[in-house]
Amino acid sequence: MSSILGSLKLVNAKRNAGTDPVIARRYKMCEKVREQIALATALKAGDTFTAKRLRRVRDEETGLSQVVEVTKKVKEWWFFNGDKVCVQLRYGSKVVPLTAKGDKNSIEVRDADEMIDVLQKLEQAITAGELDSQIQVASELLRAKFKK
């Protein structure tokens, strides 16, 4: 009679302790940029955009908690500067500088089509790791605010 465990492929493997913080920040930024793209696309089409998130809510009568889907407010990352529109990349409440020196923090665009294109390029730059050091600086500034 053959053993059940003998029929399986057994290996010695070690699970990673967690994700790399750089990759986690990239993923977070890409998700936020995708929300901005969806918001800009909806505004261009004349629609409204509502982002959803899952939240755990406890029922006061029964005491049981359940997960419900709630809407969340998505703040626009762009603003009007005269007759032009400027787009900023934000990590939480902090503006991410777009250059290594930190002297430039926004991108000027003409219209909604160019803004969507710029946001898509920013997503590609984040995925490629071009803004890792700037995002790390913004993350540290945001984290320092919570330590007080």
Image (cartoon, rainbow, N blue to C red):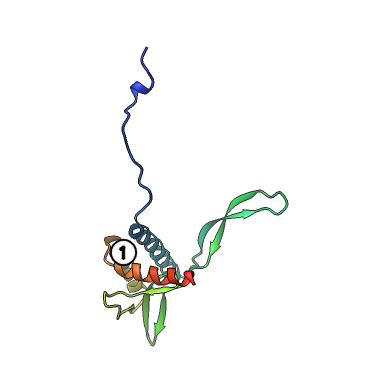
In the rendered image, the residue lying farthest to the bottom is 82
Q: Is residue 135 above or below residue 54?
A: below
Query: Could you tell me which residue is drawn at 62 percent across and 55 percent down?
Result: 57
Q: Inspect the image, locate mark 1, and give the three-letter code of the amino acid beneath it.
A: Ile
Label 1 Cα crowd, 10 Å radius (few <14 / some 14-19 / many 20+): many
Say whether residue 66 is left or right of residue 144. right
Q: Place residue 36 in its image quadrant.
A: bottom left
What percent of the width, then of the height, locates residue 76? Answer: 45, 73
Quarter of the picture containing the N terminus is top left
Q: Residue furthest right?
A: 61
Residue 134 picture quarter: bottom left
Looking at the picture, tell me which residue is in the foreground, 17 or 139.
Answer: 17
* Residue 121 showing in the rendered view: no
Residue shown at the point (32%, 69%) measured from the top left: 117
Q: Where residue 74 sits in the image (x, y, percent)?
A: 48, 68
Instruction: State the residue at coordinates (51%, 59%).
Output: 52
Q: Residue furthest front?
A: 148
Return the x and y of residue 37 as percentages of the image width and height: 39, 66
What number of labels is visible? 1
| Residue drawn at point x = 37 percent, y = 61 percent | 25
x and y percent of residue 115 in the render? 35, 73
Residue at numbered disc 1 = 126
Instruction: Name the element at disc 1.
Output: helix
Residue 14 visible to an observer of this rendering: yes
Relative to residue 55, is residue 73 depicted above or below? below
